[in-house]
Image: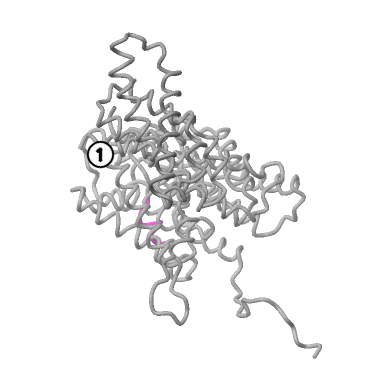
């Protein structure tokens, strides 16, 4: 039940994009097409889950015993980036179809703030290994949901007579802010 | 040959227009308007008049700035947005907040997306969510009917003290709440008018209310109370049915209403807010483009639903 609540919380209440405002660059960059955002979403779920797992292991077995917690940020970036690159090479070799799906999106998000954010927030919340992995997975799922909704909206408003000064990224941010207001309704759903 | 006129489809035309639809909704809202003035007096009237006038004013100003022609449908739709916005706030709201809310509704939620017919979110509800986030205390201070004392809404009483209200009071609307949402009977008369004149499609409110009933059963809530409480009737018949922000296809409408009902009950029972109608419709508004894309109706001549 606890793991379920962690996933629900990561998707709806503490959504990375709509509540924490992290990972906005891939959100605005890729949300102009539904197909692209499905690929991106898959890549984010994958990377966030992997990053949560490996960052937890790294924190528990290397940073904590050696008492070098101050190196957390920089070492997380390094470890996550290296791991994702490694995964990419493996996927390339093992599953060409998966490579086709995640394709170019994997390297794009390896050093994204949302991925680093989920690793650090796992540490701050004192999650166990399993909880961290589920939180990473849920955060990726929440990111994908927001991305898909936004892609649908953007495909619809593509031909709308939006004032010229608001076209493109501006209207995307306005839409995101209204979505964020709407998702405020879920706040307090799970007592912290 | 000169009489041959070549035009694209549709070829069957109806006398129905946007302003005619808006007029029907206005007529349908008259009973609720009268009820609100009876219960909340001049306070409510001031809020309603301020909001409607400022919405129309912002519409005209923005159309002028965008160098667009001012049509009858623009005026009537913005007046309707203003009326619905006034209906979903407390009669306690100061006039200047309502002017700001009208600006958010008309300028941000509607004209930033291209104006009438292009908005993704219901303008009145987007503005309500905005002022609820900005002035949470004012937005949740309710006045009791006929009196200048503050009181709690039935949903707040249920959530905080576990007290359920009496059905008849809730049906007539003689209790604290937003200006236009309290009187179930007045709203239902209007809803009936909308359904008879076919201004709204029955699918959205039907699936919305059925889902609320089903969720109440599953969650062990009082069904009649949940149906009469809060802005459910106002939301289901007058806001979720907005033709611009609800799905075009029939299966899409069923799913849209069900999603609204589901989220409403989740927020009411487990959420931090006592009421979830406004948020549920806004969230489902964001899903509408995907519903329209993936749940297309049955193509004429085909047997199966065409789900892409």
In the rendered image, which quarter is residue B15 located in? bottom right
Magenta region: which residues?
B183-189
Q: Name the residue furthest front.
A: A93
Residue B201 in the image: above or below residue B242: below
Left or right of B297: which side holds B96?
right
Q: Name the residue furthest bottom.
A: B1
Q: Nearer the viewer, residue A69 or A91?
A: A91
Q: Name the residue furthest right.
A: B2
Q: In x, y percent, where is residue B244?
A: 54, 58
Secondary structure found at label 1: helix
Residue A44 in the image: above or below residue B216: above
Q: Nearer the viewer, residue B165 or B64?
A: B64
Q: Main secondary structure of the magenta part?
A: helix
Task: Inspect this view and state whether residue B234 appears.
Answer: yes
Q: Residue at x 53, y 51 (%)?
A: A153
**For the residue carrying disc 1, how many other residues have a C-alpha within 10 Å: few (<14), some (14-19), or many (20+)?**
few
Q: In x, y percent, where is residue A42?
A: 42, 45
In the rendered image, which quarter is residue A51 located in? top left
Left or right of A163: which side holds A6?
left
Q: Which quarter of the rendering shows the N terminus of chain A? A: top left
Chain letter, disc 1 residue: A
Q: Residue at x 26, y 31 (%)?
A: A131
Q: Residue at x 36, y 12 (%)?
A: A69
Q: Which quarter of the rendering shows the C terminus of chain A? A: top left
């Amino acid at each position: 039940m606890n793991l379920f609540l962690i996933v629900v919380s990561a998707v709806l209440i503490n959504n990375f994009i709509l509540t924490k405002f992290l990972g906005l660059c891939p959100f605005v960059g890729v949300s102009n097409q539904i197909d692209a955002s499905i690929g991106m979403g898959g890549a984010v779920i994958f990377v966030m889950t992997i990053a949560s797992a490996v960052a937890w292991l790294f924190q528990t077995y290397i940073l904590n015993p050696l008492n070098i917690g101050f190196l957390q940020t920089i070492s997380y970036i390094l470890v996550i980036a290296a791991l994702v690159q490694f995964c990419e090479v493996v996927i390339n070799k093992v599953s060409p179809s998966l490579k086709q799906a995640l394709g170019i999106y994997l390297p794009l998000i390896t050093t994204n703030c949302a991925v680093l954010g989920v690793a650090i927030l796992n540490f701050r919340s004192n999650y166990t290994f399993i909880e961290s992995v589920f939180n990473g997975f849920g955060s990726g799922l929440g990111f994908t949901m927001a991305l898909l909704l936004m892609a649908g909206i953007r495909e619809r408003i593509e031909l709308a007579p939006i004032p010229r000064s608001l076209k493109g990224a501006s209207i995307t941010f306005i839409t995101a802010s209204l979505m964020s207001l709407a998702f405020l309704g879920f706040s307090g759903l799970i007592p912290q | 040959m000169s009489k041959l006129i070549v035009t694209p489809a549709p070829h069957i035309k109806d006398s129905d227009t946007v302003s005619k639809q808006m007029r029907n909704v206005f007529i349908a809202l008259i009973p609720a308007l009268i009820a609100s003035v009876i219960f909340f007096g001049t306070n409510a009237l001031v809020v309603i008049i301020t909001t409607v006038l400022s919405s129309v004013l912002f519409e005209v100003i923005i159309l002028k700035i965008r160098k667009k022609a001012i049509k009858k449908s623009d005026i009537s739709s913005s007046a309707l947005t203003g009326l619905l916005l006034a209906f979903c706030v407390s009669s306690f709201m100061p006039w200047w907040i309502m002017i700001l809310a009208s600006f958010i509704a008309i300028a941000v939620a509607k004209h930033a997306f291209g104006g009438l017919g292009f908005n993704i979110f219901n303008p009145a509800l987007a503005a309500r969510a905005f002022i609820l986030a900005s002035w949470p205390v004012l937005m949740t201070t309710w006045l009791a009917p006929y009196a200048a004392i503050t009181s709690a809404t039935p949903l707040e009483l249920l959530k905080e003290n576990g007290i359920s209200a009496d059905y008849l009071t809730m049906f007539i609307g003689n209790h604290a709440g937003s200006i236009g949402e309290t009187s179930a009977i007045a709203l239902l008369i209007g809803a009936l008018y909308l359904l008879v004149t076919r201004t709204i499609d029955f699918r959205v409110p039907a699936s919305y209310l059925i889902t609320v009933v089903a969720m109440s059963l599953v969650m062990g809530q009082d069904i009649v109370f949940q149906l009469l409480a809060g802005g459910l009737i106002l939301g289901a018949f007058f806001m979720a049915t907005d033709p611009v922000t609800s799905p075009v296809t029939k299966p899409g409408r069923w799913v849209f209403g069900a999603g609204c009902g589901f989220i409403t009950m989740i927020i009411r029972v487990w959420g931090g807010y006592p009421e979830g109608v406004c948020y549920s419709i806004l969230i489902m508004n964001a899903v509408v483009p995907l519903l329209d894309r993936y749940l297309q109706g049955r193509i004429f001549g085909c047997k199966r639903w065409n789900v892409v």
